[in-house]
Image: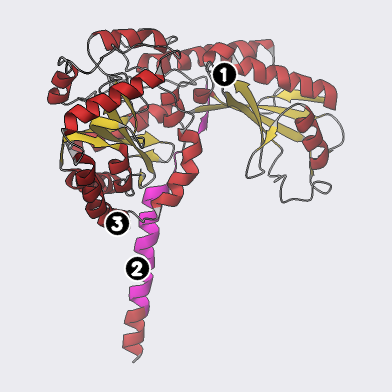
Amino acid sequence: MELQNALIIAGAVLLLLLVAYNRWQIHKARRVRPLMPEDDLPPMREPVVGKTTHPDTAARLQETPPEHVSRREPTLGAGKDHRHDDEVVAAAASAAAGSADADEIVADEVAVAASPAVSRGASAHEAEAEAGAELEAQAHAQPAPSSSAAQPQSQPDVEAPVALLDGQPTPAMIDPLIDCIVPMHLERKASGDRILPLTGRLRRAGTKPVHIEGLRAEANAWEPVTAGHQYEDIQVAVQLASRSGPLNALEFSEFVNAVEALAEALDASAELPDMTETVANARELDGFAAASDVQLGVNVISDGAPWSAAYVQTVATQDGLVLSRDGTRFIRYAPGADGVQKPLFTLQFGDTNFLRDDLTLNAGRQITLLLDVPQAPQSIKPFKLVCEYGYSLAQRMGAQLVDDNMRPLTEASFVAIFGQLEKLYETLDARGMPAGSPVAIRLFSL
């Protein structure tokens, strides 16, 4: 009995070790490092850009429409006549279906295919997907970068007409710079109502977000799959790297299995990538991101008595900063180029949690202002704004502004930091992901 008990205990310990090791491998995160003057960023290679549109679909996009369908060429701008677009979609769908019985056939297929797929889709990663949905929703459409790495990226919207002129669809969120893209060719058009119930497993692959987009021929554009829309083709992509690390073989296998299940349910053909090449690309991208992932900290140190957390909260709130959901920091927001408020920098007061701690008892002499460099657009000069706010706090609270080594920030130190920032911005621009752009925000996030 003692030997049997010992074997049972040993087996349980071994199982716990294996589970802990696997969780550590999946969830280990890349720590953000401070900017150092001696930094020497490694050379970069051009991103691997694969095909995203099936040749048959590209040919169909150039076909002459039926005579009874009033076709309008795709245009840009917010003033499109959406009612007219809906009439075109309805007419094209009617011509493709050939009869009113097509909808019943599709409904039957959804009923058969959705049931097993949805049951398989209940996974532990769905909770993580919901947590990341808010951040992913802030990413905006950006045209694919050109082959010249040095071409300016400050006005991406200007490049969209070029993509339309050469017949290529307008891109949406999926970007070959940071995504592994799997084109999926449909034998016939599929509606968003048919596709969406089958995507339960395609939310995340491990810690990496997954995106699904459909190609609308009448708009010549990719878009997130939406109910009520008809799609010529679809593409599925998993992000190659994030601050949680690169895409690994386990996550890649999980992604491919889910894509194959979706292709089978839709009777579609998927162009699956090679695992070795994809994992290698993910590691290369993660190496570049690790070298470019910089946060700048500026500290406000009291010249006299410590401050209470309640006093710090009052000052931050009066200055328009917003408390984070977890209560550990205040966030300064600034409007982006699209007018949407985006995080600029954070204010932290030691380890204080402003939601749980007793703010009258917690006290300290240091406030830290932290700038996440890759996530803030260079055009608004974020470091200058951080320093200006830090000086304002120092003057009002009887304090001084120092760096992470508690040395006063002088004009010479500012010049040195700005020089390092310029190099970092140039590196990000050359890679096709300027600081603050949607693709940079996705890459430099968890």
The residue indicated by pointer 1 is 339
Q: Is residue 66 above or below residue 245?
A: above
CA–CA distance in space, label 3 to label 1: 40 Å
- Stretch of the chain drawn in magenta: 9-36
Where, by quadrant of the figure, is residue 243 drawn? top left
The residue indicated by pointer 2 is 15
- Residue 108 horizontal/vertical position (percent): 22, 50
- Residue 164 horizontal/vertical position (percent): 28, 11
Q: In the visual, does 37 lie left or right of 303?
A: left
Give the amino acid type for the residue marked by disc 2 in the picture: Leu
Which dot, 2 or 3, sits closer to the camera? 3
Q: Quadrant of the N terminus?
A: bottom left
Q: Secondary structure at mark 1?
A: loop
- Residue 438 horizontal/vertical position (percent): 44, 24
Q: In the visual, does 384 lie left or right of 440?
A: right
Looking at the image, can residue 134 be seen?
yes
Magenta highlight: main SS: helix
The residue indicated by pointer 3 is 120
Residue found at the very far right of the displayed protein = 305
Give the amino acid type for the residue marked by disc 1 in the picture: Gly
Q: Earlier in the sequence, mark 3 or mark 1?
A: 3
Q: Earlier in the sequence, mark 2 or mark 3?
A: 2
Q: Secondary structure at mark 2?
A: helix
Q: Earlier in the sequence, mark 1 or mark 2?
A: 2
Which dot, 1 or 2, sits closer to the camera? 1
Q: Are marks 2 and 3 in contact (CB under 8 Å)?
A: no
Give the amino acid type for the residue marked by disc 3 in the picture: Arg
Q: Nearer the viewer, residue 445 or 308?
A: 445
Where, by quadrant of the figure, is residue 232 drawn? top left
